Amino acid sequence: MSLGAESSLQSSSSSEDFAAFLDSELELASCDSSPNEGDVTNNEEIDPPQRSKRQKMEGFETSEDLETERLVKPIEEHIGTSTLGKNVICPPHPGFFKGLCIRCGQIEEDESGVAFGYIHKDLRLGNVEMARLRGADLKSLLHKKKLILILDLDHTLLNSTRLVDVISDEEYLLRQIDGMKDDPDRSLFRLDSMHMLTKLRPFVNNFLKEASSLFEMYIYTMAERSYAIEIAKLLDPGKVYFDSKVITQADCTQRHQKGLDVVLGAESLVVILDDTEVVWQRHKDNLIQMERYHFFASSCRQFGFNAKSLSELMKDERESDGALATVLKILKRTHQMFFDPALGSDVSTRDVRPVSGHL
């Protein structure tokens, strides 16, 4: 589905902590397979090779992120104490952290499963465990009457340009930034560490606030992680909407393609907002294609758009009927139709794809 025809270039809540959710799920898996507390002896009875495994687990870096620490600490403690020295049968392995099975502590022999680097750089989950987590997430979201919303960044929620690409007709923007540094409602930012300017799309703050009451939201961009994290701080400074759910090009399992295999949510609940269809070849039915936001002149040149940019015209999309305000109405209708009580009490078998595709 495309929103290109619904607005033109010149027209002028908080989500559940995903890391905490996965944390609790992994703890549950650990408890299901752990020996009784009375069977666990002290560390001196652990064989040297097993003690080495524990030492490896204790070497992880916790300074990166408090959410990461909450996620990996139970895994470390479980491998370090619950299963070492025991004949734990683990077919198949639910996943690996730093090359060690999160349940039995065995060393990973191959790179099976999927890496979830945006949660922690050393976490990899197997197919069975991913299916279990997606099933648990499905029940949780349906209980809260929420769907999943995947959001692209560039040209969907914002537009960025390199400082060296700012043309003379846009230099007034640099002067504007100097005068709005203390304005909490500003939408134009200078990212000096990256030598870039970023312009948030009109209505984006209201859009995120209202959408978060209906959807669990992810950022999914083909940009580098360092850039995505900086943009996430602009969009969600309090980590209310996305927290650790920021997926970047390094997380993709197929070159030049975005995929839902790195999203621990059921595809039947997923709606995607992105300006580029070609990167979602495997999930076109989940996609609502956005009209590209060309605020800067460099963006128009990049896509061969033969018109002046919004910045050159010194105007912008209107908040009331711009692209994000328009798509929010579509998302609300999608949510309403999915959870329509007239369809019966069992929502677990419903699929958002045919619903969003006909709006």
Image: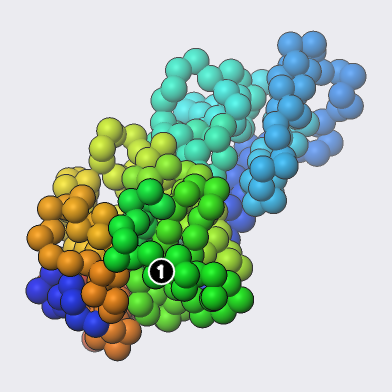
Tell me the quadrant of the picture where the N terminus can be found.
bottom left
Q: Residues within 10 Å of mark 1 (few under 14, many from 20)?
A: some
Q: How many marks?
A: 1
Tell me the quadrant of the picture where the C terminus can be found.
bottom left
Viewer-proximal residue among 59 and 94: 59
Secondary element at image label 1:
helix
Give left or right: position of 241 versus 154.
Answer: right
Give left or right: position of 82 versus 169.
Answer: right
What residue appears at the point 70 percent right and 31 percent down from the top-left corner?
Answer: 60
* Image vertical order of residue 9 relative to residue 126, above or below: below
Q: Which corner quadrant of the image does residue 252 belong to?
A: top left
What residue appears at the point 89 percent right and 27 percent down from the top-left corner?
Answer: 42
Give left or right: position of 106 versus 211.
Answer: right
Viewer-proximal residue among 142 and 344: 142
Q: Position of residue 206 (x, y in %)?
A: 42, 81
* Residue under label 1: 173
* Image vertical order of residue 312 relative to residue 281, above or below: below
**As shown in the figure, which amino acid type bears the numbered disc 1?**
Leu
Question: Which residue is outermost to the top?
Answer: 48
What residue appears at the point 13 percent right and 65 percent down from the top-left corner?
Answer: 307
Can residue 120 be spotted in the picture?
Answer: yes
